[in-house]
Amino acid sequence: MVSAQELSQIVYWHRELPPMQADPVGERTIEADSVRVPGTIDHRYELWDRCKTDLMARAAYRVEQEVARLGGRYAHVFDERIEPKHDFVSGEAWLHGRFNFTLYR
């Protein structure tokens, strides 16, 4: 029996697994950037947390878009690479992420 949460959940992260009846179709990759923040040392932990939360929300949205575009039902994100980016001209910083996932039908 499938729970209501499983019916509404599309993206499964790392140790979470999609329903057993899901059939893997292939692997895909998406990239996403977080909101840009002032690239200062002041409040760097709060800014990192803000960027990380924003990046993960944007990544989840992008994965959901890809699942819909490719005619899938679920995605299992199994790998991510997150790195800080800086624009020294504007004085801004942000996070860039690359997320690998398996598409399921």
Image: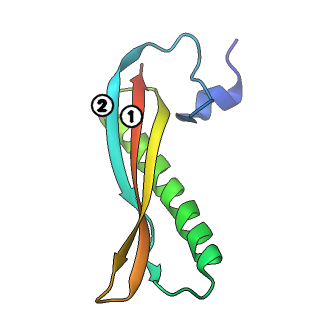
List the residue tagged with mark 1.
67
Label 1 with label 2: CB-CB less than 8 Å? yes
Is residue 64 toward the left or the right of residue 41 in the image? left
Q: Position of residue 88 (x, y in %)?
A: 32, 85
Which residue is at a point 67% across and 17% down the rendered structure image? 2
Which residue is at a point 38% across and 88% down the rendered structure image? 91
Q: Is residue 46 above or below residue 88?
A: above
Q: Quadrant of residue 92?
A: bottom left
List the residue tagged with mark 2.
70
Quadrant of the snapshot with the N terminus: top right
Is residue 58 toward the left or the right of residue 71 in the image? right
Q: Identify which amino acid the numbered label 1 is placed on.
A: Val
Q: Is residue 35 above or below residue 105?
A: below
Marks 1/2: CA–CA distance:
5 Å
Q: Is residue 5 above or below residue 51?
A: above
Q: Quadrant of residue 69?
A: top left
Helix, strand or loop under label 1: helix
Q: Which circle marks residue 16 in the picture?
A: none
Which residue is at a point 49% across and 47% down the rendered structure image? 60
Query: Which residue is at the front of the view, 83 or 26?
Result: 83
Q: Position of residue 25 (x, y in %)?
A: 35, 18
Quadrant of the snapshot with the C terminus: top left
Query: Which residue is at the front of the view, 8 or 74?
Result: 74
Q: Position of residue 101 (x, y in %)?
A: 42, 33
